[in-house]
Image (tube, rainbow, N blue to C red):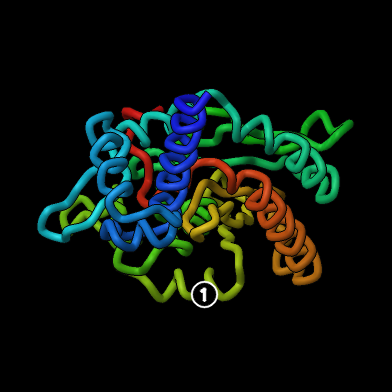
Amino acid sequence: MEGGTARMKSADRALRVLQTLARHARPMPTMAIARACNVPKSSAHNLLNTMRALGFVSYYPTDHAWGLGPSAFEVGAAYLRAGAMERMARPELATLANETESSAQLWAPVGSEIVCIECVPPDGVRAALRVDTGTRLPFVGTAPGRAMLATLPPAQARLIPDPANRNGPREWGDPSGLEEVRGAGYAQDSGGFAPGVGCIASAVVARDGLPLGAVSVIHVSFNGDSERGAYLSGAVTRAASRLSGVIAGGVAMAAVIPEAAV
């Protein structure tokens, strides 16, 4: 029994270490991890070395600090591949679609693109505008992409490649546009999907504020109808906020996930 209790304590500590590192954008020293997890420093050191051997944490000698390792990422990627985000999001997307009478989408970051992983039309509307699941678009120039970019630190957001910028630096250098999105809590575009079609999107974020995805609705452009625009943006931001609370128990992405993870 004592051996079993010790193993349970070790498992509890290891999971708390993973949660602690996932909630911090930068690697942490051993002592900081020990304090955050209420673990003696000597125990934390042994635990971290065991977790490093299994690939769940990585040690950065120049920083004298620890961060998440490739095995932790594999677990997170498996979580995403299993469709957990889509399943949790569907009821909220259905509510948003019926509230706005527009199809509602959930987007996830993949490399330098975003991909639609779920699209729900409003009930009883056969010819609703929609986006096919699997549709890929660049971060830059799309409302869902800009909504996610706006949640990243400016220096990190600028590193997302702009595929349209073929002759210059492959990064997006317009932080002023993101400041506007940050202030509003949503992004919008007109004609990004098709002529006369608009999109409003808001980011779904993890506990640390980093993007897990984005919620959007597409609609026939309302030609400056500010009342309709305010109604749609309010509905989208509320849905994204609720989904952030539901999905935040998943894996926070400190950077956009690479293509190989999908």
Locate residue 19 relative to residue 96 in the image: left or right: left
Residue 85's place in the image compared with 212, above or below, is above
What residue lies at 44% left-to-right and 54% top-to-bottom?
A: 37
Q: Residue furthest right?
A: 124
- Residue 21 position within the rendered picture, expressed as x and y whole percent measured from the top left: 38, 51
**Amino acid under disc 1:** Glu
User: Which sits in the foreground, 52 or 168?
Assistant: 52
Number of dots carrying numbers: 1
Locate residue 139 relative to residue 209 in the image: left or right: left
- Residue 74 position within the rendered picture, expressed as x and y whole percent measured from the top left: 37, 29
Q: Is residue 102 visible?
A: yes
Dot 1 alpha-carbon crowd within 10 angstroms: few under 14, some 14 to 19, many 20 or more = few
- Which image quarter: residue 109? top left
- Residue 9 position within the rendered picture, expressed as x and y whole percent measured from the top left: 48, 38
What residue lies at 20% left-to-right and 50% top-to-bottom?
A: 166
Q: Is residue 80 visible?
A: no
Locate residue 131 relative to residue 151 in the image: left or right: right
Q: Quadrant of the C terminus?
A: top left
User: Which sits in the foreground, 47 or 203?
Assistant: 47
**In terms of secondary structure, where does tag 1 sit?**
helix
- What residue does disc 1 label? 180
What residue lies at 76% left-to-right and 42% top-to-bottom?
A: 92
- Residue 155 position within the rendered picture, expressed as x and y whole percent measured from the top left: 29, 67
What residue lies at 26% left-to-right and 48% top-to-bottom?
A: 45
- Which image quarter: residue 207? bottom right
Q: Residue furthest front?
A: 2
User: Which sits in the foreground, 238 or 198?
Assistant: 238
